[in-house]
Amino acid sequence: QFHMIKYEDLRWSESLGQGSFTRIFKGSKIDIRDGERHVTDVLLKELDANHKNCWESFFEAASLMSQISHKHLLLVYGISVHRSKNVMVQEFIKCGALDLFLKREGSVSVSWKLDVAKQLASALNFLEEKNITHGNICAKNLLLAREGDASQGSSPFIKLSDPGINLAMLGRDVLLDRIPWVAPEVLEAPERLELECDKWSFGATLWELFNGGQAPLQGLDLERKLQFYETYKQLPSSEWTELADLISQCMNYQPAFRPSCRSIIRQLNSLITSDYVILHAAEPLPD
Ligand SMILES: N#Cc1ccc(Nc2nc(N)cc(-n3ccc(CO)n3)n2)cc1
């Protein structure tokens, strides 16, 4: 269920940072097709050698992404295994991860943010229809294929990245550190991921999107993060009440009470038409 890419057909160039258990590099892959040599820009995602035992889960996540195709899902070309290197070869997405972009860009318009939210909701709707749970929805895993002119509101284009190593493979501390993106019910049963988990994470990602890419509950230690769930807390709500409502609906501690993707999309559409958008055409630069 995977296209195996020969190691010698890959070239590594600059390092682009690291996620949890992985390192990412810009690179290229070489194909010979009908006698012609094609060089394609790729993103090379290497699994850390000290997490070799997670390689099946690492590739399982990627194979999920390559069994289905959708315009807002990242394209995975295949994998390459060579000696101790486990590499996932992905299409190279021009502008990288959304969280870093939001932190760098002071002013993106409200309509730009809502456009991104709608694209993520449509990707989730697609996965919901296929009864596939992603399990790691967050701004860090949203990739910006096209910036759009953020202040003029010309439209961005995002792709949802692979979910990475399965939650059930991760230690408890890693799970706790993913509060508030990881749904509360997942902490007790990380192997039983249900569709509703992604709705919860969607709410936390909406919060990031409308808070300049700032991580919610940043700086709280694991103990305090756990207390946040044990005392049924909600994230600080936006002064835009309709947005705050949608976020708290998604982040309902009862999974069954979370809205369907269709309802999320409907509510985003009504947010887009609200006069709040006009009043906040371009967010003021943070002081
Ligand atoms: N400066 C810069 C810069 C960095 C990355 C890209 N491109 C890209 N393409 C992908 N396919 C995936 C990713 N990711 C980034 C974080 C993760 C974690 O999931 N993925 N970045 C483009 C510019």
Image (cartoon, helix red, strand yellow):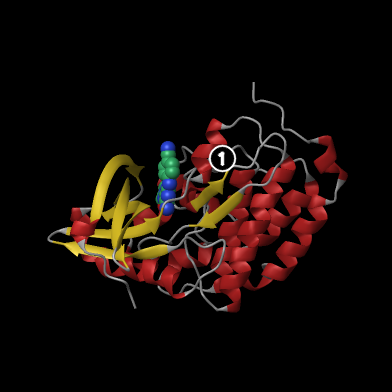
| Residue lying at 31% horizontally and 71% vertically, measured from the top left | 3
Is residue 185 or residue 76 the one in the foreground?
76
Q: Residue furthest left?
A: 83
Q: How many marks do you count on the picture? A: 1
Q: Taking 253 as reference, is 95 left or right?
A: left
Q: Percent x, y for residue 237?
A: 70, 44
Dot 1: within a 10 Å radius of its alpha carbon, few (fewer than 14), some, or many (20 or more) residues? many
**Can you name the residue that lies furthest to the front here?**
35
Question: Residue at the location (82% across, 56% down)?
Answer: 270
Q: Residue furthest top?
A: 287
Q: Is residue 91 above or below residue 127?
A: above
Figure quadrant of the C terminus: top right
Instruction: Name the foreground residue: 60 vs 252.
Output: 60
Q: Which residue is mark 1?
A: 213
> Element type at marker 1?
loop
Residue 24 can be seen, yes or no: no
The quadrant of the image that shows the N terminus is: bottom left
* Spot occupied by residue 134 in the image (x, y as percentages of width and height): 49, 67
Residue 282, placed above or below residue 54: above
Question: Mark 1: is the Cβ under 8 angstroms from ligand 1?
Answer: no
User: Quick check: 11 above or below 188?
Assistant: above
Residue 95 appears in the picture as rendered: yes
Q: x and y percent of residue 263 in the render?
A: 74, 67
Give the amino acid at mark 1. Answer: Gly
- x, y (%) of residue 56? 27, 70
Which residue appears at 76% of the width and 40% of the height? Answer: 239
Report the front residue among 92 and 271.
92
